[in-house]
């Protein structure tokens, strides 16, 4: 009976905590509550009216505290506490009390409850029993922090606005996919996670400069990880002569070494970040098509000029192929 209730509790709690299509937090095995995944699916039953279901008297005071490790000190801020009745009402578990901060004190009527503590993307769930006497319960989150950054070859800094990270589950599913935990993480921001291995994807620019790595987060520690991108910023322009002005209203199509299109854009300039390798750029202007092969060297930003000359022009039907 209790296991069924816990599973139901997890279904709606994921949406409440993360509000993302695919996300999770690992909950600790405490007092019979097994290791849990909290997928974002549904919602919880909120208390009716403005008053909390927690009592101001007549019940026992319960003090709740959380630690990153079993021997760690109490977390003093950033905890979100939610207390639920374990019996579902209309398919949902009623939330009876909540609190933000560090250690929290609730006055609850005697009975059994489910308590969840979330700390960033880390979380733990525990079943508690409240009596008439005051008592204290603690939850060990088994969590740490992750701080991510990336550089170019030789340690050259990457502009933060062009760099983003996505954090996935460390273990892939049978089809090879991984559950996304947090998208669009800014560099050098600290993300709180349960201890474990995570798959991190670093994206520089918006084309193909992508680095993947597995990173372990340890409980009670801040893990700092820096990956190295082998890429460069490239700007392309169509000109009538070397060093000339860029021709406006030009359509651009970028092909990789295999001839597959990977980027299309329109404008006098085509600027993008590309992973090191060989490419072909095709420029179309006024029904004339021009192309040029070039190589991207990691860390070497460059400007590529495509000459709008008869020698460089392609047959439009050939370009369409």
Image: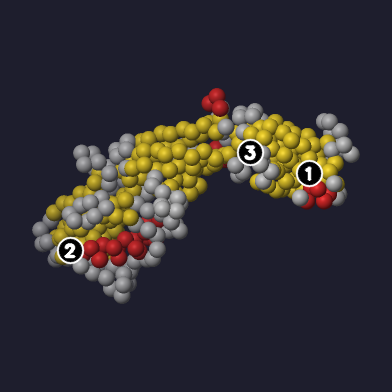
Secondary structure category for the residue under label 1: strand
Residue 273: assigned label: 3
In the picture, measured across the screen, residue 145 lies left or right of residue 234, that is left
Identify the residue under disc 1.
283
| Distance Cα–Cα, label 2 vs label 3 | 56 Å
Q: From mark 2 to mark 1, how far is it between C-alphas?
A: 69 Å
Label 2 residue SS: strand
Please tell me how crowded label 3 is: few (under 14), some (14-19), or many (20+) other residues with Cα within 10 Å.
some
Count of marks overlaid on the render = 3
- Is 23 on the left or on the right of 83, as rendered? right
Percent coordinates x, y for residue 91 in the rendering: 31, 72
Q: Which residue is mark 2?
A: 112
Establish if 47 lies above or below 301: below
Mark 3 residue element: strand
Q: Residue at x 87, y 37 (%)?
A: 311
The mark lying in front, picked from 3 and 1, is 1
What is the x, y in percent for residue 312?
Answer: 84, 38
Q: Residues within 10 Å of mark 1 (few under 14, many from 20)?
A: many
**Mark 3 → mark 1, Cα distance in angstroms:** 18 Å
Q: Residue 278's image quarter?
A: top right
Residue 234 placement (x, y as % from top left): 68, 35
- Residue 96 in sight from this viewpoint: no
| Disc with the residue nearer the chain's start (3 vs 1) | 3
For this rendering, which residue is in front, 15 or 134?
15
Front position among marks 2 and 1: 1
């Amino acid at each position: 009976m209790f296991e069924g209730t816990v599973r139901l509790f997890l279904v709606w709690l994921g949406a409440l905590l993360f509000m993302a299509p695919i996300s999770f937090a690992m909950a600790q095995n405490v007092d019979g509550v097994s290791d849990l995944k909290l997928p974002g699916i549904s919602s919880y039953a909120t208390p009716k009216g403005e008053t909390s279901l927690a009592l101001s008297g007549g019940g026992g005071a319960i003090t709740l505290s959380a630690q990153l490790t079993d021997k760690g000190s109490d977390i003093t801020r950033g905890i979100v506490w939610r207390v639920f009745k374990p019996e579902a009402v209309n398919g949902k578990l009623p939330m009876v009390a909540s609190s933000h901060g560090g250690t929290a004190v609730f006055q609850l009527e005697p009975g059994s409850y489910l308590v969840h503590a979330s700390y960033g993307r880390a979380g733990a769930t525990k079943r508690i029993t409240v009596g008439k006497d005051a008592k204290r319960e603690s939850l060990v989150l088994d969590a740490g922090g992750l701080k991510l950054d990336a550089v170019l070859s030789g340690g050259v800094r990457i502009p933060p606005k062009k760099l983003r990270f996505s954090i996935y589950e460390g273990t892939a599913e049978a089809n090879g996919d991984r559950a996304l935990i947090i998208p669009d993480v800014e560099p050098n921001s600290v993300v709180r996670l349960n201890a474990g291995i995570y798959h991190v994807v670093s994206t520089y620019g918006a084309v193909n400069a992508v680095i993947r790595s597995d990173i372990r987060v340890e409980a009670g520690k801040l893990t700092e990880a820096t990956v190295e991108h082998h890429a460069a910023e490239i700007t392309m322009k169509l000109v009538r002569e070397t060093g000339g002005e860029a021709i406006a209203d030009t359509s651009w199509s970028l092909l990789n070494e295999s001839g597959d299109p990977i980027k299309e854009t329109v404008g006098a300039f085509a600027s993008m970040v590309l992973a090191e390798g060989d490419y072909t750029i095709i420029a179309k202007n006024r029904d004339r098509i021009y192309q040029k092969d070039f190589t991207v060297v990691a860390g070497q930003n460059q400007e590529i000029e495509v000459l709008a000359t008869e020698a460089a022009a392609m047959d439009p039907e050939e370009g369409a192929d």
